[in-house]
Image (cartoon, coloured by chain):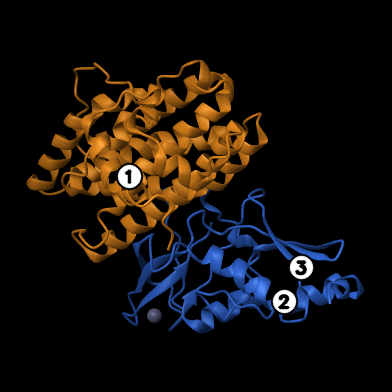
Amino acid sequence: MAALATHLSIKEIWSWLEDVPDPEIPVISVVELGIVRDVSLDGAAIVVTVTPTYSGCPATAVIAMDIEQAIRKHGIDEVRIETQLSPAWTTDWITESAREKLNAYGIAPPEKGAACAGALRTRTRIKCPLCGSANTECISQFGSTPCKAHYRCKDCLEPFDYFKSF
Amino acid sequence: MADNPTVEFALRMGDNCLVLGQNVSAWCGHAPVLEEDIALANVALDLIGQTRMWLGLAGELEGKGRSADDLAFLRDVREFRNCLLVEQPNSDFGQTLMRQFLFDAWHHPMLKMLSGAADARVAEIAEKSVKEAAYHLDRSTDLIIRLGDGSDESHHRMQGALDRLWRYSGELMAADAIDEAVVGPGLGDIEAQYKDYTSKVFGEATLTIPEAAFMQKGGKVGLHTEALGHMLADMQFLQRSYPGAQW
Ligand SMILES: [Zn+2]
C-alpha cells in the first residue's frame, strides 16, 4: 500500500484534511483554522506541516493524531507530521467560511488584522453571536480554552466566547 | 556552564517559564474568582508550552541527548538558571499577581526584541511566545491598576507585594556576556522600556516603588533562594522516585 502515496495528488490529501475537525471547536476543520501549512510527498511518505495555535494548547497533540489517522484511513502507511513555529499562527488565517460557522455556533469570530503583539490594553467592541448587538463587554481575556476570551452581552444578557485575535 | 551561549540562554528563558508556570499552576482550583482561576491556568499553560520550546532547544544544542522533560525533571536546584523573581512563593493573590506583572513587563519587550535575534531558532520561539506574553501583560497590568487603586485592603496588599518583590526585578535586566551574545546590543532599551512602563502603571495604580534600590541576584548563575528547592521537590518527586514513569 505504501506506493499508493505516489499516485495521489496533493489536492486530494488536502481534501481529506478538510474533514478533520478541530477537537475543541468541531464545527470547523483544521484546514479552516489555518494551522495546516503544507502537504508534500517525501518518497512514499506524506508529510503534513502543522503550526501550533498556542504553545501550550493541549489540543495540538490530538490534532496531530487526528491528521495522521485521517490519512491512514485512506490506506497510506507512511505519514509524518512536522511542526513549524515560524511564521507564527495568526487568527487572520482563519477562513471566511470558518468565521461564519463560529458565529453560528455561538463563538464570536476574531477581529481581522488585530493580531495582538502590539495591541495591549485595547478593547474592541465584539458583536454578540446570539443577538448581534455590539453592546458587549469583556469579562476576561482568558476563557474556556487558550484561544478564547470571555464576554457578556449587555442587551440579551447572555455570556459568550470570543475567539480572540492572535 | 555550557560553552555555547545559546544553550545557557535558552535554559534561562526556559527555566523562567517553567518555574513561573509551575508556581502559577498551583492556583488551579484555588483562585478567588472563577474567571481568575481560568486565567491563571491559561497563563500557566502558555508558560509550560514556552518551556517545552526553550528547553527543547537547549537540549538539542547541548547535544547530550537530553529532552525538555529530562532538563525539567532531572536537574538539581543549582543547575536551574531562572531569575530569583519567578521562584518567590505564591503567598496571597496580590503577591502572585505582582510577581506576574514584574515578570510580564520584562518578558514581553524581551521576546519582542528576540523575535529579531540573529539565531533563527531563538527568533522563532520568541515570535511564537511574544503574542502570548502580550495577553499576559495585558491582564496583569489591568489587575495591578484595579487592585492598587482599589479598596484599602487591596491597595495595602499590592503595596506590600511590591515592597517585597521589587528587589528581585533588577536581575531580569542585569545582562552578562551570555545575554549580550544572544540578544545583541539592544538590551539597554529593554531596561529603559521596563522602567518607563512599570512607573507609568504603578502611578496609575497609586503604588510607590520602594526607594531602597539594592537588587538581589544569583538565579541566572544557579544561586537560588530556599523556595526553589521546595518547588522542585514537589515537581520532580515522581520522576525521582519512579525514574522513567509515564502516563
Ligand atoms: Zn446578545
The residue depicted at 26 percent of the width and 47 percent of the height is: B234
Identify the subunit bearing mark 1: B
Residue B59: x %, y % from top left: 55, 38
Rendered image quadrant of residue A125: bottom left
* Residue at 21 percent of width and 63 percent of height: B33
Chain coloured orange in this rendering: B
What mark, if any, has residue A18 been given in the picture?
none
Q: Which is closer to the viewer, label 3 or label 1?
A: 3
Percent x, y for residue A149? 41, 64
Q: Position of residue B26 (x, y in %)?
A: 26, 53
**Alpha carbon of mark 2 to alpha carbon of mark 3: how far?**
8 Å
Q: Nearer the viewer, residue B101 or B19?
A: B19
Crowd rating for badge 1 (residues with CA inside 10 Å; few <14, some 14–19, many 20+): many
Horizontal relation, residue A105 to residue A10: left or right: left
Please determine whether, in this image, residue A27 is positioned above or below residue B105: below
Callout 2 environment at 10 Å: few (<14), some (14 to 19), or many (20+)?
Answer: few
Where disc 1 sits, the SS reads helix
Residue A155, above or below B171: below
Q: Which residue is mark 3?
A: A78
Ligand 1 under 8 Å from disc 3 Cβ:
no
Q: Which chain is blue?
A: A
The residue carrying mark 1 is: B141
The residue tagged 2 is A72
